[in-house]
Amino acid sequence: MSEKEVLISSQNGVGHIVLNRPKALNALSHQMVLDMLEAMKVWQGDPGIHALLIEGAGDRAFCAGGDIQAVYENGRTDHDAVMQFWRDEYELNALIENYTKPYVAMMHGFIMGGGVGVSAHGSHRIVTDNSIISMPETGIGFLPDVGGTYLLSRAPGGLGYFYGLTGGRMTADDAIYCGFADYYVPEDKFNALKEAILAGGDVDELIKAHAATPPEGDARWHHTQIADWFADKSFDDAMAAIEADESEFAQKALKVLKRQCPLSVKSTFHAINEAKQMDSIEPCLGQEFRFADASLYDVNFYEGIRAAIIEKDRNPQWVPATLDQVSDQMVSAMFKPLGEKELSLK
């Protein structure tokens, strides 16, 4: 019998979740999401549990995302099953955001896409030297979901647009500065902190005793420049500002933006704008759910996964092929209301 994909236990008043698919970089399967939901709901009402700690097995990743290969294989033939996966995953994201007990995420290695959803909504988010956080969905014909638009819309200046549209990687300091993490703990103290929390100690005191100041990342360094690109601008004006910036950093960003799925890039810009007006995670998840539903009928999502994951030729053929061919109507169609099938979160 194979080992479970998520290990759930409790000790010393601490609920403990281990994402246990190290060979798949702990990518989230539907069953993992369901198991986590069940355990967290029980612990929420258990007076014997005072905190929760989540980590990923292995050295390489906390969680590198959702199991998008399964979505690729089932999206065309079993639409309802794939949408149920997203319903359950988004319910889990909302539960984490609203959890009434300390939720400690030990964010080592790669934290991407769905991995952000089960870490960055927590109350105590710990990053370390090898932490790499990203929302790379525009590169596969999707958009930053799992509450990603909620987080990105609340990043300072234009940083949310930058990381959301380009799929850029954040270091520990970047993640803290952008609101995706809270504390940096050096790698040589990371496991010691985990063990101390699992021993039942006071979460806040233990984290403060182990935390340090991280090496400065790119987000702080380029913040003013990025803010100038995006501040109160339409998409076209923002792109014009980047194109007019002759710096190496700007031209590199422009090259990335033109490589991503054009419909996804413009849709992400729209979704972050909308999320700024939303006062909680639930409506943000709702608009992401609408996009997810539309994406299962759109060629770009399958083409993006094919090029990146299945055939790995890194040569997606996007439709439309360029940003200037994406109309506002095309973007609006990706967020069309779903009627009775809208995401409903309690």
Image (cartoon, rainbow, N blue to C red):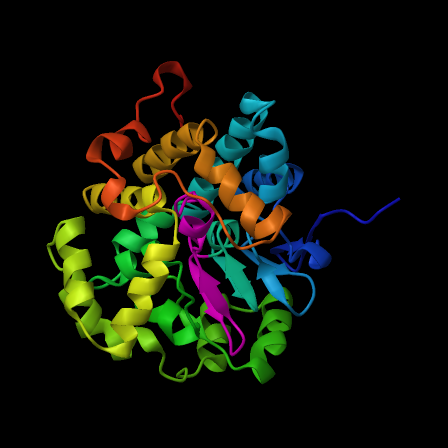
Q: Which residue is more in the foreground, 102 or 133? A: 133
* Image x and y of residue 6, in percent: 69, 49
Q: Relative to 204, say whether 267 is above or below.
A: above
Residue 47 drawn above or below residue 11: above
Residue 173 lies in quadrant: bottom left
Could you tell me residue 241's position as x and y percent? Answer: 14, 63
Q: How many labels, in total?
A: 0
Q: Residue at x 29, y 27 (%)?
A: 333
Whether residue 201 can be seen here: yes
Q: Is residue 81 left or right of residue 275?
A: right
Looking at the image, which is closer to me, 111 or 204?
A: 111
Which quarter shows the C terminus?
Answer: top left
Locate residue 25 relative to residue 3 in the image: left or right.
Answer: left
Q: Is residue 101 left or right of residue 327?
A: right
State which quadrant residue 278 falls in: top left
Choose between 39 and 136: the one closer to the eye.
136
Whether residue 179 is visible: no
Residue segment shown in magenta: 120-146
Residue beneath the point at 16% across and 51% down: 236
Instruction: Please indicate whether residue 213 sits to the left or right of residue 187 in the image.
Output: left
Q: Position of residue 31 (x, y in %)?
A: 66, 37
Name, please, the residue furthest toward the right.
1
Q: Residue at x 51, y 28 (%)?
A: 83
Q: Is residue 5 magenta?
A: no
> Is 220 above or below relative to 178?
below
Asked if the magenta segment contains residue 134, the reply would be yes
Quarter of the figure with the N terminus: top right
Residue 86: image location, x then y, percent: 50, 34
Q: Quadrant of residue 317?
A: top left
